[in-house]
Image: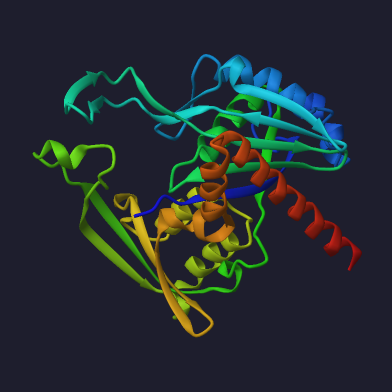
Amino acid sequence: MARTDTLTAYKCKFSYLQRNNPLIAEHRDAIKAGEAPEYSFSDFLTDYMKVSSKLAIGENADRAIFLAPDKLSTEYIDGVTRTHLIPGSGKQGKPVMVIKSSTLKQYNFGADTAALYDHHVFIYESEDSLIAIFHRQNRSGCKSVFLETANKTLKPKGLKLEMDLFVPLSNSFSNATPTKITLQYTREIISSDIADNCRHRKKREEVIRELGLNLEVKDNNKVVSIFRNMQLGKIEQEAAFAQIKAECSDGDEYNDAEVSLRIGKNKKTLKWNEFEDFVGSHDISESLHAAYKKQEDFILALTKLSDEYYTSIVHMEDTEHAD
């Protein structure tokens, strides 16, 4: 299967924590007045680098992120500051086996290691907006662990980073009607064939148990409401999954799900972890591969496509405000 490259954009802002704010007394008046904190992205980078340059680990995720000082660059273009981050992100807390594909020689590392891969994040800061664009290869990205570790860094200051998904106009997810959700308990199949565990092989999973919920009956209106809130960007995908599981007596058992959608006259079934790709992704596969082949400079080509996407977002926002 050909590799897919997508860009996913988020409108960002810093705000005060409403709960568990260690500086609640100091922030109370500002919170009541609805004021935004005097905290810039530059301030955030200074604080975040202190944590991420030593390997930041998510509180609830099994992922880590590492951002070295030389993996950050800033450029000022036409009134906009673009910051390019290249963090390493991946699994942590589990034993890691690395296989050299040419010889199939194995290198084993303990649970105190992390397997990190380079990712690309572009932050665009203007006078009135802060937009983050994350590059994803296939399903691989660093948005979740970035947001989690960012808020872990901000919590002692009584602040949080909010990121609202930007949905392209061509996207049909907001108009999709969920008809069924099937909660699943899945388990990875460990193959005895070393070739099955190579980097380019897709990991196989088996479904142990399933629980189907018909979303076209009134009894499951609460689940539909949770799903709608996710569609509208009111809650994160992880939070929606947790809330849906809480509606089932044995919901904690399930670690995955499939959702059937009706989009106009068409029907589509998606795995739960495919939603972010479907909802907010801007596919740049063809353009990136063609540009990279011509220029032989992956980062230059990716940066150009990110700039173009940012420009289209700003244009769309200006058009909506004009209307």
The answer to whether 101 appears left or right of 294 in the picture is left
Residue 195 relative to residue 118: left or right: left
9 in relation to 261, above or below = above
* Residue at 45% across, 72% down: 220
Q: Nearer the viewer, residue 231 or 284?
A: 284
Total marks placed = 0
In the rendered image, the residue lying farthest to the bottom is 265
Image quadrant containing the N terminus: bottom left
> Toward which corner of the image does residue 249 lie, by quadrant?
bottom left
Residue at 59% x, 21% y: name it.
71
Q: Is residue 24 visible?
A: no
- Residue at the spot 10% in from the left edge and 40% down from the top edge: 193
State the image coordinates of residue 17 (x, y, percent, origin top left).
70, 35
The x and y percentages for residue 134 are 59, 42
Left/right of residue 199 with respect to residue 88 in the rendered view: left
Classify residue 129 by image quadrant.
top right
Residue drawn at (91%, 64%) of the image: 322
Provide residue 90's location: percent of width, then percent of height: 42, 31
Task: Using residue 12 as the reference point, say whether residue 175 is left or right of it.
Answer: left
